[in-house]
Amino acid sequence: LDKLRHPFDLGSLEGLKRLAHTPLSHFLRREVDQLQGLIEAVTEECSRMEALLTDDLMLPEESQPVFESLAMGRVPRKWVMASWAGAHLGVWVENVLLRANQLSAWMLK
């Protein structure tokens, strides 16, 4: 979860400024926006789950499918709808991290 807590700062990205007004800048911006939204959704849901586990709170009904998917090692449907399909949670999380690192590296070039 800590690896996903750092959203992109689009205002200070040299790579995005360098690519301004090119087709690649539009593609990069769309990819970053999609990944940023996904990271925010995952972080929000995982923070909620963490609070539930540490504070012995009741699981809200809307979080139950996410919790069940995580418990079975599957990617929650809510997250798949914001990203791409993944058969196994571990592989999917690794792909999210790789994609974030790739976009970060591209923007900093």
Image: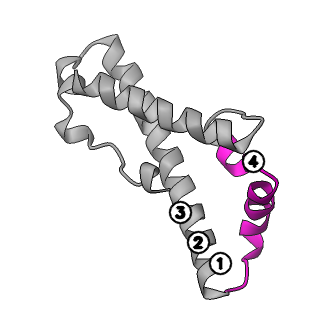
Tag 3, which secondary structure? helix
Question: Is residue 68 found inside the magenta-colored segment of the image?
Answer: yes
Label 4 or label 1, whichever lies nearer to me, is 1
Which portion, as a residue range, is magenta? Answer: 57-80
Tag 4, which secondary structure? helix
Q: Earlier in the sequence, mark 3 or mark 2?
A: 3
Q: Amino acid at mark 3?
A: Glu
The residue tagged 4 is 77
The residue tagged 2 is 50
Q: What's the distance in space between the residues labelled 4 and 2, CA to CA? A: 19 Å
Q: Position of residue 94 (x, y in %)?
A: 57, 37
The residue tagged 3 is 44
Answer yes or no: do the residues labelled 3 and 1 have beta carbons within 8 Å? no
Image point (63%, 70%), residue name: 49
Image point (53%, 63%), residue name: 44
Image point (72%, 84%), residue name: 58
Q: Amino acid at mark 4?
A: Arg
Give the image quarter of residue 50: bottom right
Q: Earlier in the sequence, mark 4 or mark 1?
A: 1
The residue tagged 1 is 53
Q: Is residue 33 above or below residue 7?
A: above
Answer yes or no: do the residues labelled 2 and 1 have beta carbons within 8 Å? yes
Q: Amino acid at mark 2?
A: Glu
Label 3 or label 1, whichever lies nearer to me, is 1
Answer yes or no: do the residues labelled 3 and 2 have beta carbons within 8 Å? no
Q: Which mark is residue 109?
A: none
Q: What's the distance in space between the residues labelled 2 and 1, CA to CA? A: 5 Å
